[in-house]
Amino acid sequence: MVKSFDLAEDSIIDVVINNVKGEPLHTISLDISDPDAPNRFAQMITNIEAISAEVEQKDKELKKKYENVTEYNHDKVVDTCRLHIESLKQICSEIDIAFGEGTIEGVYSEHLVLNPDYIPDEYALMDFLDKMIPIVNDTYHTRFELNKKKYNINRRGGKGRHNYTKEELIQRQMGK
């Protein structure tokens, strides 16, 4: 004899990313039953902030290095571009870790068609994150509230069963 049941809910939430014309580019699936997902998103933000702080520091060092250069200097341009490109690659990697491998490739697919080496700039990445983070926060907050309501002590077992403190339960067991 085989018994089966269906899960009560679908815990996958799809977020569709559209281009400026409203055409879908990429879908990000959030698994709201994954208890580690909020931690990954928080870690992404922490890591991006650390990357930004590091870039600011290195940028100051570059400005100091080239402070006496008043004319166009090829090395200055290359060093500055290299610093920013490396930081953008790190941020893209953090986004892929948090939202799934291929997120950057999917979201910026139209750009990658034109330039296979395309790396989104700070503004493009911040625009994406500014729109995505509220969705993530709302999604996981809603899940947290549902779980809190679903597994409320008063709901499971009723009033007479679970409304005792640990000390009261011990006293009841001992017959006092």
Image (spheres, grey):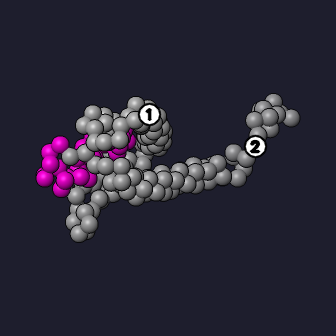
Quadrant that contains the C terminus: top right
Quarter of the image where one finds residue 77: top left
Which amino acid type is shown beneath numbered disc 1?
Answer: Lys
Residue at image point 66% right, 52% down: 154
The answer to which of 137 and 164 lies nearer the viewer is: 137
> Would you say 150 lies left or right of 48 here?
right
Which amino acid type is shown beneath numbered disc 2?
Answer: Tyr
Q: Look at the image and say whether residue 94 sits in the magenta stretch.
A: yes
In space, the residues marked 1 and 2 are separated at their CA atoms by: 67 Å
Q: Which mark is residue 64?
A: 1
> Would you say 64 lies left or right of 117 here?
right
Q: Look at the image and say whether residue 103 sits in the magenta stretch.
A: yes
Q: Magenta segment range?
A: 88-117
Q: Mark 2 points at which residue?
A: 164
Give the dominant element type of the magenta stretch: helix, strand or loop: helix
Residue 104 point in image, percent of width and height: 27, 47
User: Could you classify mark 1 by the number of other residues whose Cα lies within 10 Å: few (under 14), some (14-19), or many (20 or more)?
Assistant: few
Residue at image point 14% right, 48% down: 115
